[in-house]
Structures are given as structure tokens and as C-alpha cells.
């Protein structure tokens, strides 16, 4: 089917999910007016995280959307509530058949108590996600469980995952027999429901460690490692359009990349770094895709073939710190501006390290933790402009490192406040992973502990995505076996 790159119609996605709630898909549709991607990461990216990736999220209630990260780190800037009131607000008969009491508000032609109504929590149309109560006009925070995915969508590791507004897109990965998958699903954190991503002509071949990017209207899935004996990195991918559930193949990129950092800057997707697949040799440079064609990013000033740097995306600029080149830890700090296709070398602060957590908190690039040749770190700093400020260590989580796509996520909760979760907590024993973390307020230089996810399972190489409202954690390895457990956190 021909690919279309227009903004989503207001209610165009409501038919997509079972038990479709108008509010959730109003949010998802409104994301098309802006951008929402973590680079996960690192998270980010997002994304990303991938952690992950990035941009404004009109569907988020004042919280940031995560770039990327995606499973891939990164971070983003929050927006105002994306749910429209139907029927007006206020007491009296305006829109309501009967006069509302002093404690009530007229929302959608009904008198409700916005202090306790989960569908109108604090204001008309502000809906708490499924499983959360409304008290004092605020939706409950903390961890809640996730519903099981649709039949046939198996537990997996090493999948591509990215935020689609308040939903999470998941595709590919590896099953319990270590076979690459070509199946996907979209999970709505608002309604706690899943919808399969349909298979069709033009979809990507089975693969692990692909990277996905949400543009505000479509998902770009690129790269990864193939399902053949050679397990080589891939230069192929496809675009998924949720409006008609169709796939459109990408032209092959100039270079093949497995698990690159990915994000959307409003005009193009950029995929930086990554490896060559099974051999895990780092790949330098970046490829840019403008929804029509590929172009390689400028190599001048690129930090080189680096793996495991701390990274974050601010909506237009990618920031990198440290990482490994060969077996040598780095302390270099770099930035890339996509609109100018230009790299810059920035001032340094932290000691050489790899595997540090990176996040953009709305005005600062934060780097925390990581590993050197002998130990894990429990320190960090943030950069504002060209100035670095040391982060307080009192109340900080235990020393740890982020192992990209394996364990560890960082994301912006709201302007000035970031969260750090999971990660490896032993330099000598890579099997020791954490389930807890902490949030950090740069304005007060204070930490606040975050309880670990309830299952205590490792979720190693599982899905971890911040949607701007909730952190969604699903599947992965635990104790040597795949787990189907899903849990999500609101702060």
C-alpha cells in the first residue's frame, strides 16, 4: 500500500485497539502534531530509550515523552494535556442536566468529583491510566502490573521498542529458542491493552537489535542483526503506518548497523553508531533518513567507533559522553546538530568511563554512574551550556552502569527531574542487575529513592520505554529463562 505522511486525523486511531477509549487515542492522535520518541533510552532515545528520544508530546499531561530509546535512551520535552473536554466545565446547568454540587464539576454533561474521578482526575478529561486511582485530584503513582499480550505475541529479548505518545511500539527480537522474530504489538499504557502489529508485504525480515523511531505519525524500524548463521548487521528496514496497519520497505541505508542510537529531530531520523552484528565491532558515523532517502552524516568531529557512551537528545541536538574505543575508556564529550549536520567537541568534566547513564532533563545533559577499568561509579555531573556541575551523591542509587539494550534506563520525568533505573551493579559479576533506582532534581541537587519493580525479575534485554507518563517494562530474560511479566511505573 502506498505510504502517506500526513498528520493523523483526530480520531483516526480509535478503531485500532480493542476496547478503544476515546481519551487514549485522542492522546495518540495528538502526538502526530508534534514528536514523541525516546532514544530509551536511553534512554533516549530515548531513546529512546534509548533509553530512549524525543520532542514535544501534546498528549502527555505535563510530563516528558521519551525519546528514545528507546529502549534506546534519550529524553524529551513534555506538553500540556492532550485530552479535550466534551461538554464544558463548571458548576450549574451548563452542559449538565442538573445543577452540580459545590464539590462537583460538569464534565462531558455529567457532574463529577474531579478529586476522585479517575476519568476526570484534577480536571475534566484528565484520565488516569488503567489500574490507577484518583485521590486529591492526582492519579496514583508507583508500580502496577500489565495485562498479558495478545495470543501469539511471545515473550522476547532484544526487540525494537519506542514510545508512540502514551503507547509503546514493540517489534522483532529473539524468542525462547534464540530465533529472530518478525512479529510486533502496540501496548497502550492508558488502557492497559494490546493490539497486534499486522504482518504484510514490505515488513522487515526477522531480526534482533533493530532500532525504531516514532515520527509523530509513523514508526521507522531500521537495522539490527539478521537471523542467518553469519548474524551480520542489516542496512534494511521498513516504515509502519498505524492508520492502515501497513508496512513500506525502506531503501537500503549506506551502512549496516545493529543496535544504533536512533531518534527523530522533526525532519529526519538519525541512526548513530551501533555494531556490525555478531562480532560486536563498533561502527562510526551516522545515517540520516528524511522519509524519502538516506544521507550519511558529516564525519568531521564524529567521536569515532564508540560503544556504550552516555547519550541524550534534546529535540535537536544529540549529546555523547565517554564510551569505549577498543578497550580504552573515553572522556570525550561531543554533540551533533542534525539541522546543520555538524559535530562539536564540548568541555569535559567526568573521568574516563563507559556505560554511564545519560539523560536530557529539559535544560541539562546529565551523566551519572558508569565503569572504569576497576570499579563502578556512584558519581555524576550535568552540563548547562558549557559548564559542568557536580551532582550530589547523598541518597543516590548504588554504584552501577547502564548496559545499553540489556539493563539500565534514564529518562526525564518532568523539567529538571530525571529518573535512573536498573543497570549492572557489579564490575566483576555481569549477572548482578538492579531493579531499583532513584530520581534526581537538578534544581535542588537532591535524590529520591525509587522502589524496585514488584516482580524483582531481571528483565534482561527486555523492553523498557518511558512514554512521558509511565515507564513500561516488559519481558526479557530472568534467571536464564524468558519472562512474560510486564509492569509499569508512574512518578
Image: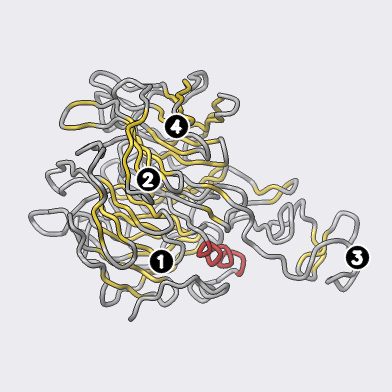
Q: Around disc 3, counting alpha carbons within 10 Å, would you say few (fewer than 14), some (14 to 19), or many (20 or more)?
A: some
Residue bearing mark 4 = 366
Instruction: Decide which of 78, 205 is in the foreground and name it.
Output: 78
What label sits on residue 92 in the rendered view? 3
**Disc with the residue nearer the chain's start (2 vs 1):** 1
Task: Establish if 140 lies above or below 436.
Answer: below
**Disc with the residue nearer the chain's start (4 vs 3):** 3
Residue visible at 71% across and 54% down in the picture: 121
Residue bearing mark 1 = 218
Please say whether residue 42 is visible from this viewpoint: yes
Q: CA distance from mark 2 to mark 4?
A: 18 Å
Task: Establish if 240 lies above or below 295.
Answer: below
Left or right of 277, for residue 166: right
Q: Position of residue 142 (x, y in %)?
A: 57, 42
- Where disc 4 sits, the SS reads strand
Q: CA distance from mark 1 to mark 4?
A: 29 Å
Instruction: Decide which of 471, 454 is in the foreground and name it.
Output: 471
- Where disc 1 sits, the SS reads loop
Amino acid at each position: 500500500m502506498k505510504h502517506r505522511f500526513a498528520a493523523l486525523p483526530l480520531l483516526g486511531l480509535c478503531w485500532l485497539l480493542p476496547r478503544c477509549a476515546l481519551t487514549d487515542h485522542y492522546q495518540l492522535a495528538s502526538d502526530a502534531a508534534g514528536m514523541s520518541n525516546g532514544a530509551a533510552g536511553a534512554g533516549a532515545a530515548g531513546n529512546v530509550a534509548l533509553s530512549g528520544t524525543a520532542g514535544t508530546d501534546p498528549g502527555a499531561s505535563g510530563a516528558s515523552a521519551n525519546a528514545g530509546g528507546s529502549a534506546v535512551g534519550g529524553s524529551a520535552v513534555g506538553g500540556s494535556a492532550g485530552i479535550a473536554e466534551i461538554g464544558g466545565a463548571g458548576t450549574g446547568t451548563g452542559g449538565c442536566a442538573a445543577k452540580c454540587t459545590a464539590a462537583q464539576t460538569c464534565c462531558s454533561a455529567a457532574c463529577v468529583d474531579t478529586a476522585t474521578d479517575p476519568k476526570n482526575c484534577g480536571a475534566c478529561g484528565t484520565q488516569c491510566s488503567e489500574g490507577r486511582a484518583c485521590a486529591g485530584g492526582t492519579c496514583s503513582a508507583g508500580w502496577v502490573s500489565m495485562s498479558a499480550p495478545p495470543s501469539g505475541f511471545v515473550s522476547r529479548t532484544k526487540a525494537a521498542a519506542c514510545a508512540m505518545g502514551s503507547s509503546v511500539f514493540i517489534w522483532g527480537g529473539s524468542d525462547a529458542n534464540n530465533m529472530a522474530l518478525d512479529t510486533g504489538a502496540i501496548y497502550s499504557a492508558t488502557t492497559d491493552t494490546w493490539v497486534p502489529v499486522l504482518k504484510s508485504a514490505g515488513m522487515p525480515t526477522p531480526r534482533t537489535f533493530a532500532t525504531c523511531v516514532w515520527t509523530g505519525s509513523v514508526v521507522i524500524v531500521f537495522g539490527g542483526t539478521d537471523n542467518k548463521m553469519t548474524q551480520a548487521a542489516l542496512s534494511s528496514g521498513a516504515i509502519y503506518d498505524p492508520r492502515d496497519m501497513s508496512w513500506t520497505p525502506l531503501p537500503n541505508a549506506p551502512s549496516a548497523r545493529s543496535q544504533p542510537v536512533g531518534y527523530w529531530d522533526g525532519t529526519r531520523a538519525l541512526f548513530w553508531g551501533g555494531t556490525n552484528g555478531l562480532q560486536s565491532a563498533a561502527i562510526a558515523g551516522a545515517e540520516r533518513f528524511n522519509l524519502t532517502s538516506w544521507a550519511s552524516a558529516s564525519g568531521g568531529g564524529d567521536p569515532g567507533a564508540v560503544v556504550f557512551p552516555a547519550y541524550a537528545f534534546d529535540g535537536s541536538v544529540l549529546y555523547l559522553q565517554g564510551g569505549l574505543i577498543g578497550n580504552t575508556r573515553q572522556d570525550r564529550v561531543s554533540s551533533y546538530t542534525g539541522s546543520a549536520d555538524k559535530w562539536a567537541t564540548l568541555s569535559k568534566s567526568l573521568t574516563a568511563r563507559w556505560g554511564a547513564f545519560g539523560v536530557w532533563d529539559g535544560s541539562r545533559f546529565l551523566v551519572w554512574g558508569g565503569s572504569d577499568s576497576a570499579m563502578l561509579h556512584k558519581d555524576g555531573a550535568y552540563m548547562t551550556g558549557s559548564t559542568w556541575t557536580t551532582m550530589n551523591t547523598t541518597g543516590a542509587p548504588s554504584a552501577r552502569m547502564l548496559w545499553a539494550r540489556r539493563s539500565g534506563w534514564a529518562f526525564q520525568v518532568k523539567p529538571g527531574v530525571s529518573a535512573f533505573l536498573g543497570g549492572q551493579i557489579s564490575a566483576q559479576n555481569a549477572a548482578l542487575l538492579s531493579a531499583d533506582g532513584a530520581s534526581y532534581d537538578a534544581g535542588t541537587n537532591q535524590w529520591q529513592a525509587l522502589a524496585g519493580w514488584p516482580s524483582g525479575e531481571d528483565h534482561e534485554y527486555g523492553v523498557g520505554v518511558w512514554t512521558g507518563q509511565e515507564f513500561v517494562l516488559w519481558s526479557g530474560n530472568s534467571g536464564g529463562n524468558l519472562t512474560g511479566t510486564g509492569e509499569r511505573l508512574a512518578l
